[in-house]
Image: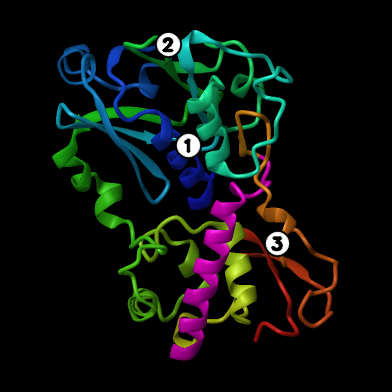
Amino acid sequence: MPELPEVETVRRGLAELLPGRIVKSAQAIDSPKSFPNANEDVRQFLVGAKILEVKRRAKVLLIELDSKHSLVIHLKMTGQLVFVKEGHTPPLGSEVNSEPALHPLKLAQDARAGAQRFGAGHPNDSLVGELPDKSTRVIIEFTDGSHLYFNDQRKFGWVKLMPTLEVPNIDFMKKVGPEPLEADFTAEQFAERFRRRAKTNIKAAFLDQTVVAGVGNIYADESLWGAKIDPRRLVGNVTEAEFHNLYHELRIVMNLAIEKGGSTDKNYVNAEGKKGSYMDFARVFRREGRPCPRCGATILKIRHAGRGTHFCENCQK
């Protein structure tokens, strides 16, 4: 499943392209659970509505409409969002897609200047091929002829229309922890969120979305390495100074990953088929058997907190 930086990459791209567009039609294709909305609600609150803003909460995307409703979107494991301007779907390798997009906003800005496509998600040909295709679950058409496609091979993701005021009342939204990159989320608040899980190991607490939002396996391992904390340590044994260091390491790792367009994990690329480049800078994740870049000891991989966990036993105490 994508982590916060990957979903933020999608948000930033769509935030450049969608606001101001007016919905002409919306339909589910072959999978009602991907678009579980009453036809009357779609006609009344989605068709004819103008997009105001594209937001994100944890790993969930929020497209806010002037009808006081929002599209709440979860990509799950194999979801994609692909914006295509004026119905044009250039094939992979065409002139539109020939220049690499090194920054997540680069492709979106190019699209405004004349390129025709932006998308991100599970890496298959739906990102770059003719749409709709067999993985397309939802099609939203805008009055200017552009389209937004929600593709999902495994049909776990969804696009839900609901009143914007009700979004905070979704069970997930009520339970999810603070955004780790928000300016008003302090190191002291970060430490306090973990203290509630004193008898839990630090890696498991990191992966708990009710503690902090949007942190998954890759960025937990990277942040713990940066802070020199063994992932198996109990939260109650982590000092206040170490929590402050972990807070800053997490923000450094997350911001770098967003800058690089996310990780090169198997399930996330953009519409040019370009994977995020964060993994070029990873220090421990998928580096097992190699020397630790800090102390030279061998990086280990173990099964911990239900996930493959990468760390240096020598310098993570």
Q: Is residue 223 left or right of residue 215?
A: right
- The residue lying at 51 percent from left, 22 percent from top is 151
Whole-percent x, y for residue 145 in the image: 40, 9
- Circle 2: element type: loop
Indicate left or right for 1 with 315 as reference: left
Q: Look at label 1 and name its amino acid.
A: Gly
Q: Which residue is mark 1?
A: 13
Disc 1 and disc 3 in contact, CB within 8 angstroms = no
Give the labeled residue for mark 2: 29
Residue 148 position by quadrant: top left
Residue 135 % position (x, y): 55, 17
Seen from the viewer's position, the closer of residues 77 and 262 is 262
Residue 100: image quadrant is top right
Q: Is residue 130 above or below residue 104?
A: above
Q: Tell whether position 254 is magenta.
A: yes
* Amino acid type for the residue under numbered disc 3: Ala
Which of the pair 54/108 is nearer the observer?
108
How many angstroms separate mark 2 from mark 3 (CA)?
Answer: 39 Å
Which residues lie in the magenta part? 239-266
Mark in front: 2 vs 3: 3
Kindly report the distance in space between the C-alpha atoms of the residues bearing marks 1 and 2: 24 Å
